[in-house]
Image (cartoon, rainbow, N blue to C red):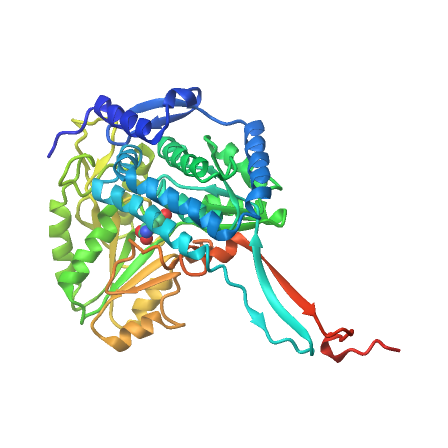
């Protein structure tokens, strides 16, 4: 269990997976973006970053494709997404291997992420026959009042390393059935995974006689993203990443009256009430806090536990954290893979140090592991830190596995602590008290976009709308009626009365 795959082994897996998906990395060779693996911390391939002229060309080509795609019947657009979903199923192992290699996710979570793509394709295919508008009763005789939803245009998708494919797929599958085209700027940490997905989508498009350039990938860093964000031919920018990134993207898009759909950070909490089933609560908390090495935007970062059960909960959690198998995500049995890079590790160390300085005590974890076997990688044992209060560091999002534990006396205090942070993404309560659960779900309960009962904060299904409030950015993606963000609404009034009848009873006959 302790051995770490050699970089050569990871590179070989990556090459095989890319080849099967139809990507030759040599075709993308150049400078500007280095594909790395957090499994060993080593570089895999040097890739060419796209310059501003290429961003513009990609957007122009996407706009050109949009002009055809917008009049392609939505169910026909759905047929393309159906084919894409089938290709994703066929290549699920290849894509999962790439996700593990570039994002460091364990096999089961990497496969889960690919499953999320397949599921959202299914969802979007159904949606392609359900882009419903409403009809309303007109106040005028012989008139019909209705709304029509039309395709919007080119959607710029900016995605993060931690969900290198699922979040793009939420956007792309829905955007495509809505009649939009996509230009995708993936995280520079996960370029290969993006190229593989794009190649499969191109294959699906070619097999479906769809126009070229429905989806294009732009490799590069912040400048590449900024060029996309500023493009007037991109009416919607859907960006997932840090709150800092969202603060730049949102105003820039708004300045040109574009729309942005922001899915930013989270500082997610769960409340454990005295009536909770503690076995269930602890199991759920361990996955939510330590899964994906604490690098989900939905990761559980704060646990707010009733004072009567807090010692019991921390004892159980400490025991669980101490034995979590940390190691090579390619190995069966590993549950916690590496952090994505050294900066993430430095941020974790700094947060734990600050927590201690602010009165906290580390109950378990926090140490670096496997440094002898993989000196350039960053494996850590998830940290459990008991805090005397919701101090400054607790109110911040640190993108690493650090779980702060706070205690509360009454329900109102629990909700206040819960909501007392800038972010508002995901939350949960563990309780057997039905009334308390309902109060948590109510208007004056948890203030997040995702609020769960007896479920941790991470691992949402694609059928619901995903996103959150406050510093999380307010966007909603994936299921429910999130599709509306990808379309424009036209209100239509049709007069079949044969005479002029003005609304609000206005008489203009003189
Ligand atoms: C993210 O971390 O950006 O709910 C997305 C979850 C996943 C998606 C997370 N379905 O944890």
Could you tell whether 213 is left or right of 372 in the image? right
Q: Is residue 229 above or below residue 299?
A: above
Question: In terms of depth relative to the viewer, which is nearer, 214 or 368?
Answer: 214
Q: Does residue 470 show up?
A: no
Could you tell whether 300 is left or right of 238 in the image? left
Give the percent coordinates (x, y) of residue 42: 28, 24
Quadrant in which the N terminus is drawn:
top left
Count of numbered badges drawn on the protein: 0
Q: In this view, does 135 lie above or below 262?
A: below
For residue 430, which quarter of the picture? Answer: bottom left
Give the percent coordinates (x, y) of residue 140: 69, 77
Question: In terms of depth relative to the viewer, which is nearer, 370 or 12?
Answer: 12
Q: In this view, does 449 lie above or below 441?
A: above
Could you tell whether 134 is left or right of 398 in the image? right
Could you tell whether 481 is left or right of 16 in the image? right
Q: Does residue 379 show up?
A: yes
For residue 241, which quarter of the picture? Answer: top left
Give the percent coordinates (x, y) of residue 245: 47, 43
Question: In terms of depth relative to the viewer, which is nearer, 490 or 441?
Answer: 490
> Of all residues shown, which one is farthest toward the right?
510
Q: Is residue 310 above or below residue 143?
A: above
Question: Which residue does the image show at 59% across and 64% down from the upper left?
Answer: 147
Give the percent coordinates (x, y) of residue 435: 27, 77
Quadrant in which the C terminus is drawn:
bottom right
């Amino acid at each position: 269990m302790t051995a770490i795959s050699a970089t050569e082994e990871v590179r070989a897996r990556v090459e095989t997976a890319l080849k099967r998906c139809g990507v030759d990395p040599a075709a993308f060779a150049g400078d500007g973006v280095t594909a790395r693996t957090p499994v060993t911390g080593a570089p895999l391939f040097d890739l060419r970053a796209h310059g501003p002229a290429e961003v513009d060309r990609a957007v122009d080509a996407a706009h050109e494709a949009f002009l055809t795609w917008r009049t392609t019947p939505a169910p026909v657009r759905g047929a393309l997404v159906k084919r894409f979903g089938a290709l994703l199923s066929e290549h699920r192992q290849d894509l999962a291997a790439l996700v593990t290699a570039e994002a460091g996710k364990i096999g089961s979570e990497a496969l889960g992420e690919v499953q999320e793509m397949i599921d959202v394709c299914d969802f979007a295919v159904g949606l392609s026959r359900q882009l419903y508008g409403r009809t309303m009763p007109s106040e005028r005789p012989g008139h019909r009042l209705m709304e029509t939803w039309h395709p919007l245009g080119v959607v710029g998708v900016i995605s993060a390393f931690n969900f290198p494919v699922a979040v793009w797929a939420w956007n792309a599958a829905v955007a495509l059935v809505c009649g939009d085209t996509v230009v995708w700027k993936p995280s520079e940490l996960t370029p290969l995974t993006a190229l593989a997905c794009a190649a499969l989508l191109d294959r699906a498009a070619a097999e479906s006689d769809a126009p070229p350039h429905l989806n294009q990938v732009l490799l590069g860093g912040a400048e590449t993203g900024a060029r996309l964000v500023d493009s007037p031919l991109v009416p919607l920018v859907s960006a997932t990443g840090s709150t800092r990134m969202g603060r730049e993207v949102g105003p820039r898009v708004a300045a040109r009256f574009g729309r942005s759909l922001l899915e930013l950070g989270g500082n997610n909490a769960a409340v454990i009430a005295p009536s909770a089933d503690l076995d269930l609560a602890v199991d759920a908390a361990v996955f939510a806090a330590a899964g994906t090495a604490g690098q989900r935007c939905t990761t559980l970062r704060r646990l707010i536990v009733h004072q009567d059960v807090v010692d019991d909960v921390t004892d159980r959690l400490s025991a669980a954290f101490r034995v979590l198998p940390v190691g090579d995500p390619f190995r069966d049995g590993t549950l916690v893979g590496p952090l994505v890079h050294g900066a993430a590790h430095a941020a974790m160390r700094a947060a734990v140090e600050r927590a201690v300085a602010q009165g906290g005590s580390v109950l378990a974890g926090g140490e670096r592991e496997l440094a002898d076997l993989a000196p350039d990688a960053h494996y850590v044992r998830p940290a459990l830190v008991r805090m005397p209060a919701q101090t400054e560091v607790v109110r911040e999002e640190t993108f690493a596995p650090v779980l702060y534990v706070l205690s509360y006396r009454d329900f109102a205090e629990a909700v206040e602590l819960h909501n007392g942070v800038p972010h508002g993404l995901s939350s949960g309560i563990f309780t057997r008290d039905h009334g308390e659960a309902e109060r948590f779900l109510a208007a004056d309960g948890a203030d997040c976009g995702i609020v769960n009962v007896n479920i941790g904060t991470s691992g949402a299904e694609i059928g619901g709308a995903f996103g959150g409030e406050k510093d999380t950015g307010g966007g909603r993606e994936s299921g429910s009626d999130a599709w509306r963000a990808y379309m424009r609404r036209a209100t239509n009034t049709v007069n079949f009365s044969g005479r002029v009848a003005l609304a609000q009873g206005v008489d203009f006959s003189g």
